[in-house]
Amino acid sequence: MLFDVFHYEKWPKVLEHFNLESNNLPIKTFTQSNGSALKIKSNGGESEFHKNLKETISKNLDLLNLKNYVVGETEYFFPSADAIDILFENSKSIVEIEVKSKISNEADIIRGMFQCIKYESPIEAKNRVNGSRKRIRVILALENEFPKNLLIST
């Protein structure tokens, strides 16, 4: 069904009818023509670039202006067996960090955006189970600049 939505050929007419503008999100940059996700090239594990960036951020909280936290926990596993790269927690809030190193391509950065959305839910569930009301933030930390063609103009 999503394939049909993403590849519907009359979206420009729908937008025009409702006086809307396209956000020009490059769907084709992260889906194949059949709608399936692009494969992220991987050599079977974390690159040294990714490991180094993750360790650097976890130990240098000032890089992300995180005050009142201790060193971040790397590879924090959720009950679903998913893992976020870094998790910082204090008495009032939880900050999750997904890291993309300088060798991450555009498809990997887009995957990271979706991972950030996905990883907010298990922490929210943990909060509720524990009766906690901690503020939750999820950050995508890029070693390079965010690709301009992925920005959505408002």
Image: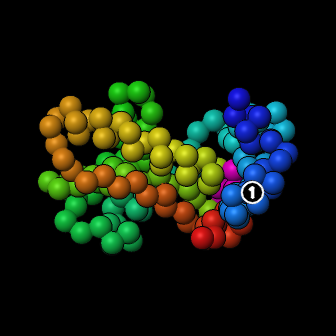
Taking the spot 63% from the left edge, 65% from the top edge, the residue there is 152
- Residue 99 location, x and y as percent? 50, 55
Label 1 sits on residue: 17
Q: What stretch is highlighted in magenta?
A: 103-107
- Neighbor class of circle 1 (other Cα within 10 Å; few <14, some 14-19, many 20+) is few
- The answer to whether 103 appears left or right of 131 in the picture is right
Main SS of residues in magenta = loop
Tell me the quadrant of the picture where the N terminus can be found. top right
Nearest the camera: 141 or 20?
A: 20
Taking the spot 39% from the left edge, 44% from the top edge, the residue there is 120
Taking the spot 81% from the left edge, 54% from the top edge, the residue there is 13
Name the amino acid, label 1: His
- Residue 84 location, x and y as percent? 42, 44
Q: Quadrant of residue 61?
A: bottom left
* Picture layout, residue 8 above or below residue 97: above
Q: Does the magenta stretch include residue 105?
A: yes
* Picture layout, residue 145 above or below residue 6: below
Nearest the camera: 2 or 56?
A: 2
* Picture layout, residue 109 above or below residue 9: below
Residue found at the far front of this picture: 17
Taking the spot 47% from the left edge, 46% from the top edge, the residue there is 117
Whether residue 39 is visible to the viewer of this picture, yes or no, is no
- Residue 83 location, x and y as percent? 43, 38
Tell me the quadrant of the picture where the C terminus can be found. bottom right
Q: Is residue 15 magenta?
A: no
- Residue 108 location, x and y as percent? 64, 50
* Picture layout, residue 125 above or below residue 134: above
Whether residue 67 is visible to the viewer of this picture, yes or no, is yes
Q: Which element carries disc 1, helix, strand or loop? A: helix
